[in-house]
Structures are given as structure tokens and as C-alpha cells.
Image: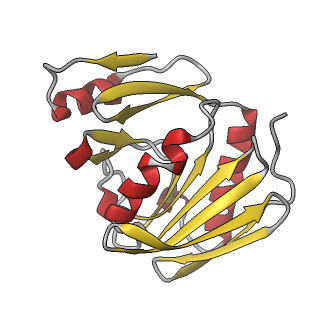
């Protein structure tokens, strides 16, 4: 489902997105000025929870591993709600929408759209924003792709992992360890 209207300003679209009640099993985001809905299944929930548990195991307080909090990227009229945002130690609790400068790492779980936005637009936006690490978990392929070291609007490194591997990365001077051995796959 897509909602586009050239009359809305970016700020108005963000307001609509913040008030929008997506149908059960869907997440809403803003992509190039269009509100899109992406399906979310049980597999998403399991992987999201695993990422949040890894943040807790790294010693972060619960509020620094958020889920589905709107983050605007006004330059390209995007407003993403990452599956997991790991907030920097300098971030303040309860800020909405969440500025990209507050985010140290993002985990996105690929949806039924086969991840075109996760593998494309979001890689570029998160790198331009200086987000230290971006992990794409793909239950359709049983793989992860880890982007790290943002520099001049692009990630310098990209590593591939299979579900079953241990994924390690550092963001905001904190090491994160994700055991993907029990992450579910979609068939």
C-alpha cells in the first residue's frame, strides 16, 4: 500500500506517519515521500528480540535498544522506523522522532518485498547519517550483511554471514555479539 501526495510537506508526511495505525502485521515508513507498509511476521519478532537481547548483554539499558521509532532523513524525504536502533550513549531517553545522530547501529529484518529498500536506499541513508553499523538480517535467504565504518556517505566494509554464524561489531565504543544459530528462516 502506498500513500503519496505532492501537496504534503515532509513535516506533514512525518506527522501522518506518526499518527498512522498500520494494520496488524505491518510496519509503516516513509520512502522518498511515499508512505509504505511492509509485512512483519513472527520471524521478524524473533530476530528483533535477539538483537535487543544482544544490546542488553553488551551492558546497554533497555531504552537504548529501541524498535520501530521514527527517524527522519529529510534530504531524500525518508522516514524510517528501524526494526532495532541502538542508541548512542549521548542520546536522551524518550525523544520522538529520533534524530539519526542519536543512532549508533541499526538492525533491519528483510520483509516480503525481498529487501530492496533494506539493501539499497537504507544502506545509503544510514551511511550518510554516520551510523556506525548496519546489519541486514534476511530470513528469506538465511543470511546477514553487516555494513560498518561509514565514511563520506558510504560504508567502507561489508561482511556476509550465514544464519548460524556469530556476528560481532562495534558501535559507539560498545561490542555487540549476535548468535544467529537459532534465527528462523522463511521458506
Establish if 105 lies above or below 117: below
Establish if 143 lies above or below 116: below
Given residues 119 and 135, the one toward you in this image is 119
Q: In this rendering, would 110 be left or right of 31?
A: right
Given residues 100 and 64, the one toward you in this image is 100
**Residue 103: x, y in percent?**
40, 62
Residue 175 appearing in the image: yes
- The residue drawn where x is 31% and y is 41% is 78
- The residue drawn where x is 48% and y is 21% is 22
Establish if 5 lies above or below 125: above
**Residue 35: x, y in percent?**
36, 25
Q: In this rendering, would 62 be left or right of 125?
A: right
Q: How is the image coloured?
A: secondary structure
Residue 67 appearing in the image: no
Establish if 185 lies above or below 166: above
Q: In this rendering, would 123 be left or right of 77?
A: right
Q: What quarter of the picture does the C terminus occupy?
A: top right
Q: In this rendering, would 136 be left or right of 33?
A: right
**Residue 155: x, y in percent?**
45, 70
**Residue 137: x, y in percent?**
67, 52
Q: How many marks?
A: 0
Q: Quadrant of residue 69?
A: top left
- The residue drawn where x is 41% and y is 66% is 131
- The residue drawn where x is 79% and y is 50% is 142
Given residues 42 and 187, the one toward you in this image is 187
Q: Residue furthest bottom?
A: 173
Amino acid at each position: 500500500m502506498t500513500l503519496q501526495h505532492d501537496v504534503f510537506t515532509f513535516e506533514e508526511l512525518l506527522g501522518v506517519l506518526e499518527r498512522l495505525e498500520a494494520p496488524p502485521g505491518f510496519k509503516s515508513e516513509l520512502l522518498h515521500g511515499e508512505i509504505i507498509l511492509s509485512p512483519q511476521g513472527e520471524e521478524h519478532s524473533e530476530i528483533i528480540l535477539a538483537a535487543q537481547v544482544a544490546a542488553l548483554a553488551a551492558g546497554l539499558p533497555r531504552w537504548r535498544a529501541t524498535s520501530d521509532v521514527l527517524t527522519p532523513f529529510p534530504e531524500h524525504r525518508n522516514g524510517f522506523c528501524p526494526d532495532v536502533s541502538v542508541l548512542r550513549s549521548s542520546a536522551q531517553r524518550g525523544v520522538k522522532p529520533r534524530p539519526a545522530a542519536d543512532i549508533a547501529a541499526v538492525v533491519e529484518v528483510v520483509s516480503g518485498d525481498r529487501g530492496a529498500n533494506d539493501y539499497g536506499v537504507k544502506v545509503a541513508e544510514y551511511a550518510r547519517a554516520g551510523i556506525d553499523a548496519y546489519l541486514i538480517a534476511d530470513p528469506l535467504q538465511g543470511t546477514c550483511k553487516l555494513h560498518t565504518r561509514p565514511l563520506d556517505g558510504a560504508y567502507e566494509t561489508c561482511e556476509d554471514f550465514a544464519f548460524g554464524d556469530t556476528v560481532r561489531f562495534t558501535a559507539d565504543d560498545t561490542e555487540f555479539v549476535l548468535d544467529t544459530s537459532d534465527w528462523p528462516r522463511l521458506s
